[in-house]
Structures are given as structure tokens and as C-alpha cells.
């Protein structure tokens, strides 16, 4: 038989037998520790969803404030084929300049042999006029043959003087041998009562090559002179431009070239003169850029390119600020870079 003591007394088991009573102390029990049940993690999905909507609203407000408070800028790179029609172009004073240069000739020309020419005078002692046909042949004292070029109508003579007529004639053979001296033909000829006398013949030349003016002589000299004129033109233009103004290029010029000798003319040297007259014009670049900016202010890039195309601008690169889809409304916030091609 055993009894269990209450919880306030030491824990013993009592065993009563016939001859004895035995107390046995119970082993101490481990204290019971009550454990707290594990809690499930809080679920934040609804809270997160509410935070995302709030973040979007906040970003929208920040973006609106950015677009409203931060000044927009745009840069336009414009490639123009000519001065835009919008530009106010004004004429500058005309510029006229002349340069001359003496240069040696380098051309070679083959000159064929030529016939000498001169005059033959006929004297008629007959009291009746006589006609000497063209093509009448004479043989001079040196053996040169002379032929008349035209008929000679020789009037009648009288007893005190002879009728006379003079016509052109030429040496039959080419070359210097035909340059006969005066009187090489002298005496009766052709008809009765007719005498013929020649003047000195000239112009007979043998075939030869001569130094002459070549076209390249004129062209090379003119090119050199034109380069000098261009340098002088640039110096003159720089004195005509006001600060901030830009020259319209190319500058229209008219050029006239003259030489003292024609091409093919025998000459060892010649003079070449170049005269140039230019009519420059200019425009104010800053004014032009502001005018172009006013055309495209507030436009989309596509609209701006279409507008600029009508101003001789073939291509336009447009760079906008972040989150902007239009150019600024204020022209001071549009920077235009004009490049002429």
C-alpha cells in the first residue's frame, strides 16, 4: 500500500509492510515549461499593394513638379543646303579687282611655206588702151616666175606720156626665193607697146615651226592671277562684315580674262590680265537662329522637321530634355546649330 503526498510536501512514496514501513523519495520531475505557440508571419500583401499605389501617385506628383519647375531646353542641329529663305540678307558694296602678269609662251606652231606678193606696173605707149589678162606669167632676171592676180586695164598713151596700170601678182613658187627685189621684172612683155616693172615682193616664207601662244599659257597665268584675287577678296570682305554677321557663300563673282596675244600667234611672251567683279551679301546669324526657333517653338520633332525643310534645311537632328516630347515654347530655350553643306 502506498500514498501520495500532496504537492506541498516532499514527494515520498510510503510502503507499509507487516514488520516495517518504508519511505522512498520520488525522483524530482523536470519542471514543465509552457511553450508559446509559434505565431504565423504577418501578411503584408494588402499593405504593400496600398504602398505601390501611393508610390505611383507620389512619382506622378514629382514628375509634374519636374515638368513645371525645371526649364526645358532643346538643341537642333540643322544641315542647310543654302541660306534659309527666312534670313534677312543685305548687299555689301561691290568689289572690283584687276591683276596682270607677263609670262613666256610654250606653244609650237607649224607654219607652212607661203608665196611672196608684190605689185606689177604696166606701161602702154600705144595710143589705144590695152588689157593684160590675169594669170600672165613673167620670169624675172633671177629666174623667179611671177603671175598676175588680176587683169590690168592699161589706158592709151599719148606722145608725151604712157598709160599705166598696176595690179597685184605673186611668186609662183613658195618660200623666201619669191621675195624678189624691185625691177627684177623690167622691160617689154605680153603685148606690143607694153612694158612691165615690178616692186619689191615680200611675204615669202619657208615652212617652219615657231614659238607661239598656247591656250595652256593663258589658262595657267589666269589661274595664278585668280588665286591672288581670291586672297585679296577675302581680305576686303573681312573689312566689310560687321560683328555678328555672316557672309553668304559662295560669293557671286564675274571674271574676265584677256591676253595680249591670241592663241597660235607667234610670240616669245605675252601679258595676261584677269578682272574680277564680286557682289557679296551677308546676314545676321543670331537673328536667323532666333527666327528659326520661333517657327518651331512648341512643336513636336516631326512637325519641326517639316517646317525646317521649307527653309532649305535638308536634315535636322533634334535633342530634347528627358521626358519631353515637344520643343520648348520659349525661343530662348532652343539652341539651333546651323551647318551649311
Image (spheres, grey):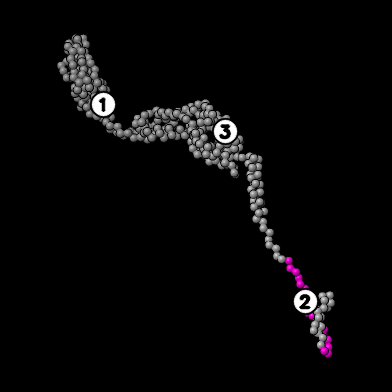
Mark 3 or mark 1: whose residue is earlier in sequence: 1
- Count numbered badges in the picture: 3
* Mark 1 → mark 2, Cα distance in angstroms: 163 Å
Query: Can residue 185 be spotted in the picture?
Result: no
Q: Which residue occupies 41% across, 35% down?
A: 220
The structure residue drawn at horizontal position 40% and vertical position 30%, both measured from the top left corner, is: 270
Q: Residue at x 50, y 29 (%)?
A: 280
Question: Which element is circle 3 on?
Answer: helix
Q: Which residue is mark 1?
A: 116
Q: CA distance from mark 3 to mark 2?
A: 97 Å
User: Hey, which quadrant is residue 295 in on the image?
Assistant: top right
- Label 3 and label 1: CA atoms lie apart by 82 Å
Within 10 Å of the Cα at label 2, are there few (<14), some (14-19), or many (20+) other Cα atoms? Answer: few
Q: Where is 261 relative to 319, above or below? A: above
Q: Which residue is mark 2?
A: 29
Q: Tell me the element at label 1.
A: strand
Give whichever of discs 1 and 2 has the lower sequence position. Answer: 2
Residue 218 appears anywhere in the view:
yes
Q: In the figure, 147 relative to 78: above or below?
A: above
Q: In front: 51, or 256?
A: 51
The numbered mark, 3 or 2, whose residue comes first in the sequence reads 2
Residue receiving disc 3 = 294
Assess whether residue 32 is covered by the magenta stretch. Answer: yes
Q: Which residues are magenta?
A: 18-36
Q: In x, y percent, where is residue 49? A: 64, 52
The quadrant where residue 262 appears = top left
From the viewer's perspective, is residue 41 above or below residue 223?
below
Mark 3 or 2: the one toward you: 2
Q: Is residue 35 magenta?
A: yes
**Whole-percent x and y of residue 20?**
83, 88
Locate residue 178, reporting x and y percent: 25, 27
Amino acid at each position: 500500500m502506498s500514498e501520495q503526498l500532496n504537492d506541498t510536501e516532499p514527494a515520498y512514496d510510503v510502503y507499509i509492510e507487516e514488520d516495517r514501513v518504508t519511505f522512498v523519495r520520488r525522483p524530482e520531475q523536470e519542471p514543465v515549461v509552457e511553450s508559446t505557440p509559434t505565431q504565423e508571419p504577418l501578411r503584408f500583401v494588402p499593405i504593400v499593394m496600398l504602398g505601390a499605389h501611393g508610390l505611383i501617385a507620389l512619382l506622378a506628383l514629382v514628375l509634374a513638379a519636374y515638368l513645371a519647375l525645371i526649364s526645358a531646353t532643346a538643341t537642333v542641329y540643322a544641315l542647310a543646303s543654302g541660306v534659309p529663305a527666312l534670313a534677312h540678307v543685305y548687299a555689301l558694296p561691290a568689289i572690283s579687282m584687276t591683276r596682270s602678269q607677263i609670262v613666256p609662251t610654250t606653244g609650237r606652231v607649224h607654219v607652212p611655206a607661203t608665196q611672196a606678193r608684190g605689185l606689177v606696173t604696166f606701161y602702154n605707149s600705144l595710143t589705144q588702151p590695152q588689157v593684160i589678162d590675169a594669170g600672165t606669167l613673167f620670169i624675172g632676171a633671177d629666174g623667179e616666175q611671177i603671175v598676175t592676180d588680176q587683169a590690168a586695164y592699161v589706158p592709151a598713151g599719148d606722145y608725151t606720156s604712157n598709160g599705166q596700170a598696176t595690179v597685184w601678182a605673186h611668186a609662183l613658187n613658195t618660200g623666201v626665193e619669191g621675195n624678189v627685189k624691185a625691177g627684177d621684172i623690167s622691160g617689154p612683155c605680153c603685148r606690143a607697146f607694153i612694158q612691165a616693172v615690178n616692186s619689191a615682193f615680200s611675204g615669202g616664207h619657208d615652212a617652219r615651226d615657231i614659238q607661239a601662244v598656247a591656250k595652256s599659257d593663258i589658262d595657267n597665268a589666269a589661274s595664278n592671277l585668280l588665286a591672288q584675287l581670291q586672297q585679296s577678296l577675302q581680305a576686303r570682305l573681312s573689312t566689310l562684315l560687321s560683328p555678328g554677321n555672316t557672309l553668304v557663300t559662295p560669293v557671286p563673282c564675274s571674271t574676265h580674262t584677256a591676253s595680249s596675244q591670241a592663241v597660235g600667234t607667234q610670240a616669245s611672251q605675252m601679258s595676261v590680265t584677269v578682272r574680277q567683279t564680286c557682289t557679296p551679301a551677308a546676314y545676321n546669324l543670331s537673328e536667323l537662329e532666333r527666327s528659326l526657333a520661333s517657327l518651331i517653338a512648341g512643336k513636336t520633332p516631326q512637325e519641326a522637321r517639316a517646317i525646317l525643310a521649307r527653309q532649305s534645311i535638308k536634315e535636322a537632328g533634334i535633342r530634347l530634355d528627358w521626358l519631353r516630347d515637344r520643343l520648348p515654347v520659349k525661343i530662348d530655350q532652343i539652341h539651333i546649330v546651323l551647318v551649311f553643306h
